[in-house]
Amino acid sequence: MSQSVVIGGGCFWCLEAVFQRVKGVEKVESGYAGGHIDDPDYRSVCRETTGHAEVVRLTYQEDVISLKELLDIFFIIHDPTTLNRQGNDVGTQYRSVIYFSTDTEGEQIQQWMPEYQKEFAQPITTEIKPLERFWSGESYHQNYYNNNSQQPYCQIVVQEKVNKLLKYFGDYAV
């Protein structure tokens, strides 16, 4: 049975590239969530006037990979201790966030957080909130890394995240 979760941890191109390479993930869609305006676009999100974060919606087969395993990957490939920042990407749109769909998911995620915190010297700043609405990103943001792998940002920043997946979770990679 397919499930979905929406996560944000920096640029959505990075998350998309990583999770497209994970067994059991059927679909990865870049978009926006967590803001206060309808139908946001990239420019308005980057101006930090919408309250939205850059996120990806992961649709996955829970009999192949669990939500916990997806979050294990999530907490390794980005720094959840930097508020509104991942590397040189700075702003509220780059915040670390997990949007859950059911109260049970939210409770599970909260229960797992002390385990994740043990891995970091600084406090985790990841927001955990119910998903109100996911807005799909513009078409040019979809499948970005696969379509633009020679672009410098992809070679330097995105590839580093993909390499972390392969290093720490090679068994999960397709």
Image: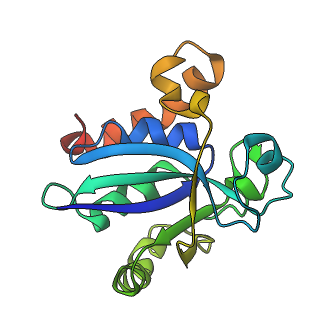
Residue drawn 73% across the image and 51% down it: 40
Can residue 80 be seen in the rendering of this structure?
no
* Percent position of residue 89, x then y: 73, 43
On screen, residue 125 versus residue 102, left or right, reads right
Q: Quadrant of the C terminus?
A: top left
Snapshot quadrant of residue 141: top right
Residue drawn 60% across the image and 62% down it: 96
Can residue 57 be seen in the rendering of this structure?
yes
Q: Quadrant of the N terminus?
A: bottom left
Residue drawn 35% across the image and 61% down it: 4
On screen, residue 52 versus residue 160, left or right, reads right
In this rendering, is residue 106 above or below 119? below
Snapshot quadrant of residue 125: bottom right
In this rendering, is residue 60 above or below 173? below
In this rendering, is residue 114 above or below 72? below
Snapshot quadrant of residue 66: bottom left
Q: Residue furthest front?
A: 38
* Percent position of residue 90, x then y: 78, 49
* Percent position of residue 129, x then y: 55, 77
* Percent position of residue 48, x then y: 84, 55
In this rendering, is residue 118 above or below 40? below
On screen, residue 51 versus residue 118, left or right, reads right
Residue drawn 13% across the image and 60% down it: 63
Q: How is the image coloured?
A: rainbow
